[in-house]
Image (cartoon, grey):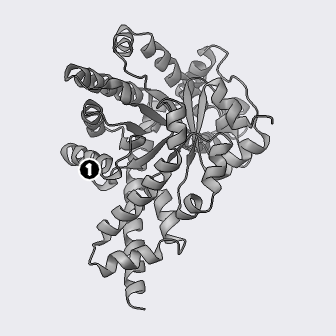
Amino acid sequence: MAKTTLQQLADYGQSAWLDHISRSLLEGGKLNDLISQGLRGMTSNPSIFNQAISSSNDYDVKIAQLKGKGKSTFEIYDALTIADIQDATDLFQPVYKATNGLDGYVSLEINPKIAHKIDEQIEEGVRLFQAVGRPNLMVKVPATREGFSVIEELTSRGINVNATLIFSLEQYVFTVEAYLAGLTRLLKNKGKADKVHSVASVFVSRVDTTIDDILEKRAGKDENLRSLKGKAAVANCRVIFEQYQNFVNDQRYKTLTSQGANMQRVLWGSTSTKNPQYSDIKYVTELIARPTVNTLPEKTLLAFLDHGRLQDSFISSYRGSKKILSDLRAQGIDINSVCADLLRDGVKAFEDAFEALLNAIEKKAAALVDR
């Protein structure tokens, strides 16, 4: 039987993960089917859980049971999400074992409401890792100023970390430095670095959405400006990936990997196409590189299975990508400033989604108990 595009992608060196989770996906056999087609991991976030819980009746029985036992809204949320993550990690266990721990991970995000509190995030990250109780869990930590300390501490304790909401090169550099510092401490304390894996999640499509909007407002009849549309996000990713290659050739990385430590892979996130004028798999086909991960929403994943094809997207030099960012800067559009705004907005968006999720659970619980 011919291999699917996801299986070909994995053979090449890029792992496809699904950016979605729901009870029906776990119980209906669909996730198992996707795994058989080459899916190698899963990510979640407050927005995804909000959609899964608030827009279906799949969780109603459990919500009513937990509310009947006097559980708080947060405790109900905690029980629902941990159960989903446990079931998902169990389904991915064969992938985890077959890839010797490279893939098969499911990510669970720390409460976004404590995103600016270092000690509380560390405590919550440890609690979630222990509560899920699966080696193929990744704890998601936002790559903020406070988050870098959390990434280092959790890594030093042998916890897999998905550093999320990375937009800029600077954020990426700090993320890797935190991971390396955590590994160094882990090894110094005689920990098992070979069991620890991490990804640095670089968000993609929002960069184009923001910069395209600026270009559209400024362009008028200027075709030179219009020609820059749809190019900033991938250019930014390529510059970040060049830095990844510099890191893995650095003596510090080589020293750590010689002691059994694993490289932190770059993960492309937020890869759905927002602009209908672009290909629906633009941020898949233009970001195929090894060794990386691409976490795709279900619609994008299915589209790639349907009409995607394997190609090495990073065979040319990085000079062209740097020129795109330089041309944008010449027009007064600074990628670093855009990324800083996107990070701030992203943290706030996850916090708002988390609040909306808790409100949805609270309303459901009240309605179900009153029946």
Is the N terminus in the top left, top right, bottom left or bottom right quadrant? top right
Residue in the image at 34% along x and 10% along y: 255
**Residue designated by label 1:** 127
75 horizontally vs 8: left or right: left
Q: Secondary structure at mark 1?
A: helix
**Number of numbered discs:** 1
The percent position of residue 291, horizontal first and vertical second, equals 55, 24
The percent position of residue 98, horizontal first and vertical second, equals 54, 33
113 horizontally vs 304: left or right: left
Q: Tell me the kind of residue under disc 1.
A: Arg
| In the rendered image, the vertical position of residue 119 relative to residue 240, given as above or below | below
Residue in the image at 50% along x and 43% along y: 93
The reply to whether residue 279 is visible in this rendering is: no
**Crowd around label 1: few <14 · some 14–19 · many ≥20 (10 Å):** few
Is the C terminus in the top left, top right, bottom left or bottom right quadrant? bottom left
357 horizontally vs 271: left or right: left
The percent position of residue 109, horizontal first and vertical second, equals 38, 49
| In the rendered image, the vertical position of residue 12 relative to residue 79, given as above or below | above
- Which residue is more in the foreground, 79 or 268? 79
The reply to whether residue 57 is visible in this rendering is: yes
Residue in the image at 40% along x and 43% along y: 137
